[in-house]
Image: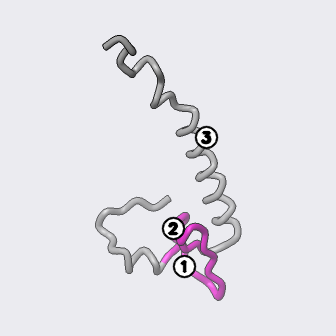
């Protein structure tokens, strides 16, 4: 996925958010993200699901990080 801090929001709308390719006659959107093809939509959803599974698998709110009840 593109990750450029120098690009403005307007510049990013000119190309696909996944591959950086040009848009054709049809522009696909997924979660307000412009994508150039169905293939990029599938790649975007697969990456989003993988990120979600990774984040959900982390033990961010583990009980061992909390203070004991007696304190």
Question: Quadrant of residue 37 in the image?
Answer: bottom right
Between circles 3 and 1, the one closer to the viewer is 3
Task: Identify which residue is drawn at 46% across, 78% down.
Answer: 13
Q: Nearer the viewer, residue 31 or 16?
A: 31
Instruction: Estimate the spatial distance between the alpha carbons at disc 3 and disc 1, rounded to whole Å.
Output: 30 Å
Q: Secondary structure at mark 2?
A: loop
Q: Position of residue 54 (x, y in %)?
A: 56, 38
Q: Main secondary structure of the magenta part?
A: loop
Specify start and end residues of the magenta stretch as a single range: 15-35
Q: Secondary structure at mark 3?
A: helix
- Residue 27 lies in the magenta stretch: yes
Question: Quick one: label 2, few (<14), some, or many (20+) residues within 10 Å?
Answer: many
Q: Nearer the viewer, residue 61 or 31?
A: 61
Label located before the other in sequence (3 or 1) = 1
Q: Position of residue 49 (x, y in %)?
A: 63, 49
Task: Identify which residue is drawn at 60% across, 51% down.
Answer: 47
Instruction: Estimate the spatial distance between the alpha carbons at disc 1 and disc 2, rounded to whole Å.
Output: 10 Å
Left/right of residue 8 with respect to residue 37 in the rendered view:
left
Label located before the other in sequence (1 or 2) = 2
- Residue 30 lies in the magenta stretch: yes
Task: Identify which residue is drawn at 35% across, 11% down.
Answer: 70
Instruction: Estimate the spatial distance between the alpha carbons at disc 2 and disc 3, rounded to whole Å.
Output: 21 Å
Between circles 2 and 3, the one closer to the viewer is 3
Q: Position of residue 65 (x, y in %)?
A: 39, 21
**Residue under label 2:** 17
Rendered view: 59 above or below 69: below
> Quick check: marks 1 and 2 in contact, CB under 8 Å?
no
**Residue under label 1:** 22
Quadrant assignment for the C terminus: top left
């Amino acid at each position: 996925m593109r990750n450029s801090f120098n690009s403005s929001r307007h510049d990013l709308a000119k190309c696909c958010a996944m591959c950086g390719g040009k848009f054709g006659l049809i522009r696909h959107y997924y979660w307000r993200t412009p994508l150039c093809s169905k293939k990029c939509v599938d790649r975007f959803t697969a990456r989003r699901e993988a990120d979600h599974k990774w984040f959900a698998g982390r033990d961010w709110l583990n009980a061992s990080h909390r203070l004991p009840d007696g304190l």
